[in-house]
Amino acid sequence: VAPGEPLAPGQIYESNGAMLAAAVRDAGATAEQLRFVPDDVEQFRKVLADRIVAGVDLVLTSGGVSAGAYEVVKDALTGHGVDFVRVGMQPGGPQGAGTVRFGEVACPVVTLPGNPVSSQVSFEVFVRPALRRAMGHPYPERPIIAARSRDALSSPSGKRQFRRGTVDAVEGTVGEVGSPASHMLAALARADCLFVVPEEATAVAVGDVLDVWLLDSAL
């Protein structure tokens, strides 16, 4: 349901569109948001064709790219210029990217996962720096500092984790907000940073030094 509308039983607010549109604007670009494209391959391709022919510079999608029996985005774009892969990060394992062509017009497309935190973290890792670099921004990357962990944490081996946190720059410490779960958007809203648990680590001890991506920087 669109934000601001009353919720009926079993309904939730659509958050990914508003979140990603805000992220695109924060990166310095202009966002055009399309909501509620039906779970229908042909209808999805028609909406995509309309916007690409109209001349957009980049298409971002959210959801429909995982390993379910019916993944609309994956079904619509496989074999049409987009490669779908799983990457060793959490959240945000399923990803897709490529160039889609309709007639004489081609457009880059990035297909993000559907869980809210997965979608936003994927934007931060893969899309935001590329978007800012394409616009010639002098600081395309988020500022990164080193900080000591305030928490003892566990992490799955082989996956680079981007966890939500709050940083104390004076003390040089970082602590987790919420949990690693990819549906907990409220924790992301309270965070001012993402901190990285390397893929080779299975645990973080209090005092361990971690890379911290500052989300509230003016750069």
Image (spheres, helix red, strand yellow):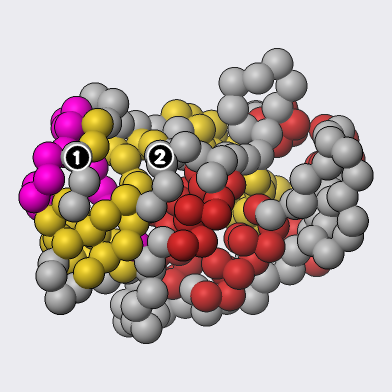
Residue 179 percent across, percent down from the top left: 41, 41
- Dot 1 lies on which element? loop
Q: Earlier in the sequence, mark 1 or mark 2?
A: 1
**In the image, residue 161 lies at what x, y percent?**
31, 40
Horizontal side, residue 157 vs residue 30: left or right: left
- How much space separates mark 1 and mark 2, taking CA atoms? 13 Å
Going by the numbered disc 1, the residue's amino acid type is: Ala
Whether residue 106 appears in this view of the structure is no
- Left or right, 25 with respect to 181, comes to right
Q: Secondary structure at mark 2?
A: loop
Q: Characterize the local packing of mark 2: few (<14), some (14-19) or many (20 or more) Cα atoms within 10 angstroms.
A: some
Image spot of residue 199 (x, y percent): 22, 34
In the picture, measured across the screen, residue 56 lies left or right of residue 92, that is right
Asked whether, in this view, residue 102 is left or right of residue 143, the answer is right
Residue mark closest to the camera, 1 vs 2: 1
Which residue: 19% across, 28% down?
Answer: 202
Locate residue 2: give its quadrant.
bottom right
Residue occupying the point 23% across, 58% down:
174
**In front of the other: 13 or 111:** 13
Please report the residue visible at 41 percent of the width from the left and 79 percent of the height from the top: 136
Residue 43, position in %: x, y?
89, 40
**Amino acid type for the residue under numbered disc 2:** Pro
The vertical placement of 134 against 174, above or below, is below
Residue 72 lies in the magenta-colored region: no
Q: Quadrant of residue 29 in the image? A: bottom right
- Name the residue tied to disc 1: 152
**130 vs 14: above or below:** below
Depth check: give the residue in front, 29 or 219.
219
Residue indicated by mark 2: 180
Q: Which residues are magenta?
A: 193-209
